[in-house]
Amino acid sequence: MSITLETEHSIKKKYPKRHNHYGFRDFFQFDPDKGTIVDWNGSQNILTTEDFIVGLVEGLQEEVGDASAATMYTIGCEWGTKDAFFFEKWFEKEFDRNVRQTNLMFLLETWWWPFTAQGWGRWEVDMGDRKQGFMFINIFDSAVARTLGDVGKPVCYLYAGLFAGFFTELVKKQLSCIEIQCYSMGETYCKFLLGGQDRIDAAAFWMNEGATARDIEKRLRAGDILR
């Protein structure tokens, strides 16, 4: 887990334009005297156990009940929005180019790499339907779903909010996100739908009617929406 507190990374300070910083000991800088962990981009990281995630989820459920999902989503949105600004700043500083003038897949892979390094899982972005106004994101080894296990329902609301917040800021257009397949439902990976609210509402309705992720993909690609 990272906190956006800009702190100078000693190796990056020495090699500010270096890009091959993907080794664990290069990406993270540990200072045992200060008790800090700073990553390559200047975020201060903290180590948490799976008990922390369980406590966060169960604590919210106890405090706000069914609204806990919406609360986690909102937290994710705020996180994603703030991280978009932070990402744009360090990306342009490291690569000497504007995020708007960069190949989109390179941009997205560069954004997600720190999350993978921090333990949030690997991802796969499917932009084949982008011109239709939506896209799919797969997360492998979700920190939340892996921790909670098979509970028979989607649990990665934090991720959904993160994607909604980040991409909304990136494209300057209001987007929403919903998890349509989850490791905690017995699946092998988590799948998210990102798009306008009309498509998210449609996907939520179909899920409540028992539709699978594959069903939702087919209906969206066929142009089905709620009337």
Image (cartoon, rainbow, N blue to C red):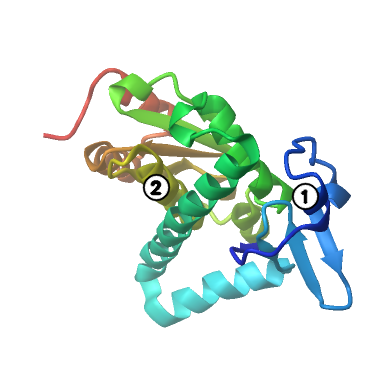
Res. 157 mark: none
Identify which residue, 79 or 146, lies in the foreground.
79
Residue bearing the label numbered 2: 164
Label 2: element kind = helix
- 10 Å neighbourhood of mark 1: few (<14), some, or many (≥20)? some
Give the image quarter of residue 130.
Answer: top left
**Residue 24: image location, x then y, percent:** 84, 48
**Residue 227: image location, x then y, percent:** 11, 34
At horizontal 58% and vertical 28% (from top left) the residue drawn is: 106
Compared with 197, 145 (above or below) is below
- First of labels 1, 2 by sequence position: 1
**Residue 93: image location, x then y, percent:** 60, 44
- Number of numbered discs: 2
Residue bearing the label numbered 1: 12
33 sits left or right of 121 in the view: right
| Residue 160 appears in the figure | yes
- 10 Å neighbourhood of mark 2: few (<14), some, or many (≥20)? many
**Residue 195: image location, x then y, percent:** 33, 36
Compared with 214, 161 (above or below) is below
- Tell me which amino acid carries mark 1: Lys
The residues tagged by marks 1 and 2 sit, at their Cα atoms, a distance apart of: 30 Å
At horizontal 43% and vertical 18% (from top left) the residue drawn is: 128
At horizontal 46% and vertical 74% (from top left) the residue drawn is: 61
- Tell me which amino acid carries mark 2: Ala
Compared with 204, 131 (above or below) is above
Label 1 or label 2, whichever lies nearer to me, is: 1
Q: Residue furthest bottom?
A: 63
Label 1: element kind = helix
210 sits left or right of 124 in the view: left
Q: Residue furthest left?
A: 227
